[in-house]
Amino acid sequence: MKFIKNNARIQEQDDAALIARYKSGSDLEALGALYNKYMHLVFGVCLNYLKDEEQSKDAVMQIFEELVVKLKIHEVQNFKSWLHVLTRNHCLMALRKQSKHTTVSIEDTFVENTDFVHLDMDDTKERKLTVMEKCMETLPEEQRLSVDLFYLQEKCYKEVADITGYDMLKVKSYIQNGKRNLKICIEKKSSE
């Protein structure tokens, strides 16, 4: 599966060179070569979240369209990791839109080992959302605000630091600790 037909010379360039080439002149051929390297991974992540092959194929195209804009404005050190986060966030937003709830799939972000998903099979999404909301309220203010901005409002670390006035290292710490505390709270409330 190819996104854009590339010549071999461009395909052989490393990620950083392709990003630089794209940023310097909006070279879609370079961006296409870069995306082709990881498109199968993007599709896999989409399929994992969306559970629908056609919807996942559409998401792969939409994510490329996002890349055209977002890669111009973000400083990307590790493209593969950055693309994974972009893909995951795209899928979570799609799931939220489908369910018409703003936090319906947030448990996928916070509970990576999916323990939260394995509540009693009769529990509804409403129950899960209630637990999530209660646990968010238990976080210290700095963690709650940082987690909210980073995961729910999809701000990057720098944007969270700018909005809150917290130091960048503090922001990363608040997000990491908030995520851990949220997971602990969810697991505790799930077993009650």
Image: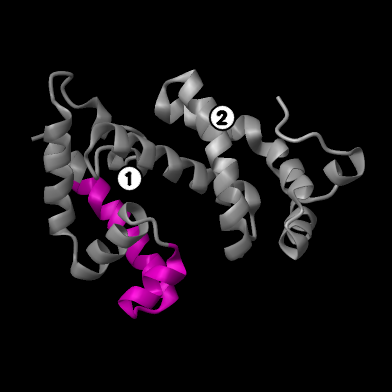
- The residue closer to the viewer here, 108 or 91, is 91
Dot 1 lies on which element? helix
- Closer to viewer: mark 2 or mark 1: 2
Q: Quadrant of residue 109?
A: top left
- Of the image marks 2 and 1, the number of the one nearer the N terminus: 2
Q: Quadrant of the N terminus?
A: top right
Residue extent of the magenta highlight: 156-185
Is 127 rendered above or below residue 66? Answer: above
Please name the residue shown 18% across and 30% down the image.
125
Name, please, the residue furthest toward the left. Answer: 192
Residue 131 among magenta residues = no
Mark 1 surroundings: few (<14), some (14-19) or many (≥20) residues within 10 A: many
Q: Gap in Å between the C-alphas at discs 2 and 1?
A: 21 Å
Dominant SS in magenta: helix
Mark 2 residue type: Phe
On the picture, is 136 further left or further right than 4? left
Residue at 86% from the left image edge and 44% from the top image edge: 12
When the figure is inspected, residue 133 is found, relative to residue 138, above or below; the finding is: above
Amino acid type of the residue tagged 1 in the rendering:
Phe
Q: Which residue position is annotated with label 1?
A: 110
Task: Name the spot of residue 165 as percent of width and height, x first.
Answer: 34, 80
Taking 192 as reference, is 92 left or right?
A: right
Q: Is residue 173 magenta?
A: yes
Residue 63 rendering spot, x and y as whole percentages: 54, 41
Give the quadrant of the C terminus: top left
Q: Which mark is residue 43?
A: 2
